[in-house]
Image (cartoon, helix red, strand yellow):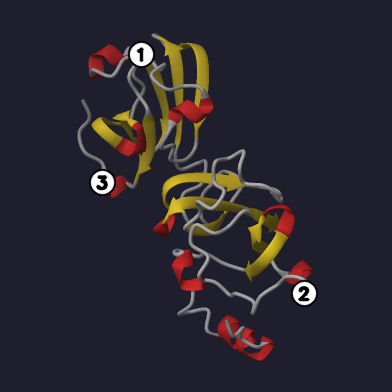
Amino acid sequence: MIRPSKLLAGAACIAALVIPACVSGGYGPGYGGIERSEVVVHEGENYSGTAQSFDGAVPDFVEYRLNDAISSIRINSGSWEVCTDANFRGRCEVLTSSTPSLRALQMNNNISSMRPVDGYGYPPGQAGPGYGSLTLFSQTGLRGDALTVNRDEPNLSRAGFNDRARSVDVRSGVWAVCADGNYLGRCVTLDRPVSDLRDAGLSGSISSVRLLPDNRHRRGY
């Protein structure tokens, strides 16, 4: 594969209005400049093999011939969300530090898109923690074990809270709570606390939650 020159890489940065990510020509043995990149993805574990550096969102790694081919990620600045599907869909994980092996996250050779996020998992310019906050409780009456969520969560089992919620405190924002993972199955829209989820028909059966834009708000249960 012919690698673009450093000059072309610089031109790509200038064209940032039409290209979502500024990507280097390539890194690996014999290449330099990794320290200047915000994030560097590697095809091999322990930051080995062919690599590419990025300074912005990558909605589809197919464009860079890296789809489902990333095994380690070096983060030099910020937090980054990596997702199994293009356009930041599917199962996503937020990385706050360099990760020499993605196997523990079950993301090895399983990443199709990536974007920078803030400390709460939101892309720059989108809703922050003040926009949406929801707390799930393991008992009715907003009691018991609690899990606070400030962002979309497609699989509550990762937080040990799958099918455990029996009440919910909606502190801000409008939320969809769903019976199945990835926002599938029966979903209910909530914009206020519910002391007993039996009233909504979802007691002990919530597997995913997501924050809805206000203009998608519909009457709840």
Residue 179, picture quadrant: top left
Of badges 1 and 2, the one in the foreground is 2
Residue 15 in percent (x, y) is at 52, 84
- Identify the residue position indicated by label 2 in the image: 33
Q: CA distance from mark 3 to mark 2?
A: 44 Å
| Observer able to see residue 15 | yes
- First in sequence, mark 1 or 3: give its number: 1
> Which amino acid, mark 3?
Arg
Q: CA distance from mark 1 to mark 3?
A: 24 Å
- Identify the residue position indicated by label 1 in the image: 195
Residue at screen point 45% across, 13% down: 138
Q: Are the residues flagged by discs 1 and 2 in contact, CB closer than 8 Å?
A: no
Mark 1 element type: loop
Of badges 3 and 2, the one in the foreground is 2
Q: Are the residues flagged by discs 1 and 3 in contact, CB closer than 8 Å?
A: no
Residue 12 in percent (x, y) is at 56, 83
Question: Taking 22 as reference, is 170 left or right?
Answer: left
Q: CA distance from mark 1 to mark 2?
A: 55 Å
What is the number of the mark on residue 216? Answer: 3
The C terminus - image quarter: top left
> Which amino acid, mark 1?
Ser
